[in-house]
Amino acid sequence: MKVTYANNIEVYKFREVSNSHLWANIYIDVADNDKDGAGAILIRSDYGSWDFFWGSCGSPFKKFLTEIGKDYLTGKLCGADKEFRQHEWQIDARRIVDEYFADYDPEDEGRASAIEELDDIDKNCNFHSSEGMYAYLNGESPTLTDVFSDSGEYPNGNFVPRQLEMFVEQIWPVFVEELKKEI
């Protein structure tokens, strides 16, 4: 691990993280007056690139970074740039269908139709976005569309990108430990 400074920007360079060939450059730009914890982070790594600016964190910026939770961090770093995972969407859709028809007869025609539509999506479709999935449902899956509309619940298929999850699991803790040594 190496820290360099240039124009008030600190660069943390990690190489061969966790006994692997993983690497990351993490750039920290702490505001001139850091008592309220303003600062920016820019990450370049094997797992991708992300950045975010916090205008006020309530504590010095580096201390703030050591205290934030992984879900909060990933939410800030990826923002609305979620990835669609069809398999997870299918699991959530099946849960909603099962809950919706829980009080129905297991042989109910509506339930059978919804399950058949889910199976058809699983076998014949490959979507890369939730928008594509919903457009398909509206045109090709009337029973599922009705179930999701009536229940007021739509399956979740949008998740934090896997690369960001891996970064936060494998490299972020090493970075946090380095910051803790400094503060």
Image: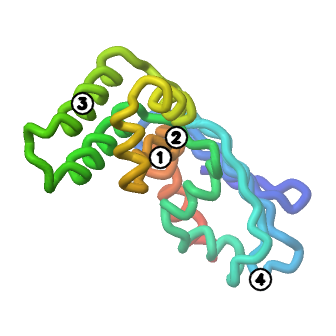
Identify residue type, mark 3. Ser
- Position in image of residue 25 (x %, y %): 67, 44
**Residue at horizontal 47 percent and vertical 46 percent from the top:** 165
- Position in image of residue 77 (x %, y %): 64, 52
The residues bearing labels 3 and 2 have C-alpha atoms spaced at a distance of 33 Å
Residue marked by disc 1: 165
Point out the frontmost of discs 2 and 4.
2
Identify residue type, mark 4. Asp
Identify residue type, mark 1. Glu
The residues bearing labels 3 and 4 have C-alpha atoms spaced at a distance of 57 Å
Q: Is residue 161 above or below residue 66?
A: above
Report if residue 2 is visible in the image: no
- Position in image of residue 44 (x %, y %): 67, 41
Q: Nearer the viewer, residue 49 or 152?
A: 152
Residue marked by disc 2: 161
The residues bearing labels 4 and 1 have C-alpha atoms spaced at a distance of 28 Å
Q: Are marks 2 and 1 in contact (CB under 8 Å)?
A: yes
Residue marked by disc 3: 113
Residue marked by disc 4: 36
Work out which quarter of the rendered image holds the C terminus and state it: bottom right
